[in-house]
Image: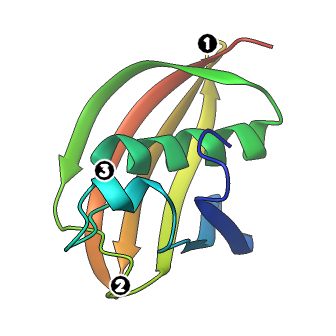
């Protein structure tokens, strides 16, 4: 985990090749004191990191981002509004690389769409 104590996985399932992972965001994390004190916002790069860590859990490998061809930030993730974040993703191994497609949802609203390719570094 890149940011210690930033989130915890509360449930994780696989359904027809799609992974659904529920995480609880620590709304008292140090990150929110600077981003932003009066209205905490989860940085987009941190949301992207959640998907990388999910791909690492699923592949059981240490991964490095190679490309992020399609990243769309669609709504603010505010831990004071809802601490729960749902990550839906599919991960396939293609020519030695892990290709992920995913969406992050908060309160049934899509916050992020991502398509990314990772390479194994372990």
Q: Disc count in the image? A: 3
Q: Secondary structure at mark 2?
A: loop
Give whichever of discs 1 and 2 has the lower sequence position.
Answer: 2
Give whichever of discs 1 and 3 has the lower sequence position.
Answer: 3
Q: Is residue 50 above or below residue 5?
A: above
Q: How far is mark 1 from mark 2, CA to CA?
A: 41 Å
Question: In which image quadrant can residue 105 be found?
Answer: bottom left
Instruction: Answer whether residue 84 is visible to the viewer in this image.
Output: yes
Residue drawn at point x = 66 percent, y = 59 percent: 5
Question: In which image quadrant can residue 11 be found?
Answer: bottom right
Quadrant that contains the N terminus: top right
Q: Estimate how packed mark 2 is, as few (under 14), some (14 to 19) or many (20 or more) residues with alpha carbons within 10 Å.
A: few
Q: Nearer the viewer, mark 1 or mark 2?
A: 2
Question: In which image quadrant can residue 106 be found?
Answer: bottom left
Residue at mark 1? 95
Q: Secondary structure at mark 1?
A: loop
Q: Position of residue 17 (x, y in %)?
A: 65, 58
Residue at mark 2? 80
Q: How far is mark 1 from mark 3, CA to CA?
A: 31 Å
Q: Secondary structure at mark 3?
A: loop
- The answer to whether mark 2 and mark 3 are in CB contact below 8 A is no
Residue drawn at point x = 27 percent, y = 71 percent: 110
- The answer to whether mark 1 and mark 2 are in CB contact below 8 A is no
Give whichever of discs 2 and 3 has the lower sequence position.
Answer: 3
Q: Position of residue 47 (x, y in %)?
A: 40, 51
Which of 1/115 is in front? Answer: 1
Residue drawn at point x = 61 percent, y = 36 percent: 92
Q: In the rendering, which numbered label is found on residue 34?
A: none
Quadrant that contains the C terminus: top right
Q: How far is mark 2 from mark 3, CA to CA?
A: 14 Å
Q: In the rendering, which numbered label is found on residue 43?
A: 3
Q: Nearer the viewer, mark 1 or mark 3?
A: 3
């Amino acid at each position: 985990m890149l940011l210690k104590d930033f989130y915890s996985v509360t449930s994780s399932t696989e359904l027809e090749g799609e992974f659904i992972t529920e995480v609880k965001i620590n709304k008292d994390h140090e990150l929110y004191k600077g981003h932003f004190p009066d209205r905490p916002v989860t940085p987009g790069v941190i949301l992207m990191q959640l998907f990388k860590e999910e791909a690492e859990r699923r592949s059981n490998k240490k991964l490095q981002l190679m490309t992020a061809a399609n990243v769309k930030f669609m709504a603010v993730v505010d831990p004071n509004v809802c601490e729960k974040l749902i990550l839906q993703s599919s991960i396939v191994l293609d020519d030695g690389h892990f290709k992920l497609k995913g969406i992050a949802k908060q309160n049934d609203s899509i916050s992020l769409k991502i398509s990314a390719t990772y390479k194994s570094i372990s």
